[in-house]
Image (cartoon, helix red, strand yellow):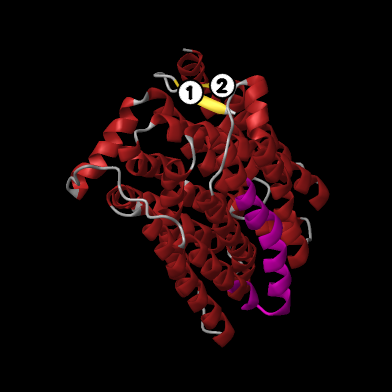
Amino acid sequence: MAHQVRNDGGMTQSSGPSRLSAAYWRMTGATGLNAVGQGAFAAAVPLLAATITSDPRMISGVLASVYLPWLVLSLPVGAFVDRYDRARLLWCSQALQAVIAGIIALLVALGSLDITRLLLLTFALGACQVMVGNAAQTILPDIVEKRSLHMANGYQQTATNVGQQFVGPPIGSFFFAVAIALPFGVEVAALSLASVLLFALPRAHSHQVTHPRLGRAMADGLRWLASHRLLRTLAILLGVNTFCFHLGNATLVLFATQTLHVDPTGYGFLLAAAAVGGVLAGLVCSRIVNVVGDRAALLGAPGSNVIVFIAIELSPNSIVLGILLAVNGFSTIIWNIITVSLRQHIVPASLLGRVNSVYRMIGWGLIPLGALTGGFLAYQLGLRAPYPVGGVIRGASLLIALPVIMRTMRA
């Protein structure tokens, strides 16, 4: 499968052989290892927080601290990614994450981790992830032909979902039941191995001929995205969607364990259910796009998310909830693959890091607010309440953005 770029930001399909390089597969292997560690952490840290406090507001605050760096650090990180060797930034940030995860494991083993230290350390992990996420998306067009980006992004998303939601969470919840510190040791090992694989990537220097001052470099990324109507609209819609997603999921651990009476191991498998849909989406996204086109796939994904979030409120048991989370995972990954591929096609290489940083700042910057809002809604109205509220907001935002997406992609 191959793609050609159109000036309006759409993509057309053309035939041609696709080949993914050895460097790409090393990066994908590192992505999978990183995802296993992150998945184990994602399952264990809410359980850990729940052993420290039962206040939904504090537990949602832990999730907010992981994503707050996307709001406060995205712009300078984007400028650094365009300025320096992207491969080196990638493996160094991954190695630093392993160190931070090791500190968490040590403090848990010593019984010295309170909620304040947990908030600070999860913020530090999130700060490293801003660099890892931006550098990984920005370096991909350097090691993959543009005509193979849908396929390459699909495999990356599959590796991420298999590790982060399918393999990691059961490991994290199982080891948590054995010893609280063990899941964080798993994360240390996975992140360390990922860093070794990334160290072998070929050097990927900046595409910039000159290096403007940091303030001007960040402003260039802001101006470029602001001038592109389609990507600007998608970034805002992503921001609303991630706000709503975490509005619901911030207290999922309490909804599952207290309302549906799921044990820690069952909670890990509940998280893994979302990966079933995500893995399938990563494998079939390019085929779906070939059949229905970018526009239909792009609009169908958030539409499905709206229905799922409203339906989650009515979940009578963990089986129904798991099915709904799987559908949500499928739709979310379809959206991610298409929008990431669009940016990699449209944005000039010399600006990709900065535009990615602005896009993700808008798209992920509201996650902490969504998590905190979900915590307060759950505290005031009950643990089911955040999901229908998020579904309604998602539906309204999609209706508002629909005319712009239809016009720009039809053109």
Asked if residue 220 lies left or right of residue 272, the reply is left
The residue positioned 40% from the left and 39% from the top of the image is: 359
> Pointer 2 and pointer 1: residues touching (CB < 8 Å)?
yes
Does the magenta portion include 30? Answer: no
Look at the image and tell me in which quarter the N terminus lies: top right
Q: Position of residue 360 (x, y in %)?
A: 42, 43
In the image, is 149 to the left or to the right of 257?
left
Q: Where on the picture, by quarter, is residue 294?
A: top right
x and y percentages locating residue 114 in the rendered image: 51, 77
Mark 1 packing: few (<14 Cα in 10 Å), some, or many (20+)? few
Residue under label 1: 4
| First-in-chain label (2 vs 1) | 1
In the image, which residues are magenta? 158-184
Query: Where does residue 202 sit, x and y in percent of width and height?
Result: 42, 55
User: Would you identify the image quadrant in which residue 110 lies?
Assistant: bottom right
Q: Which residue is mark 2?
A: 14
What is the chief secondary structure element of the magenta stretch?
Answer: helix
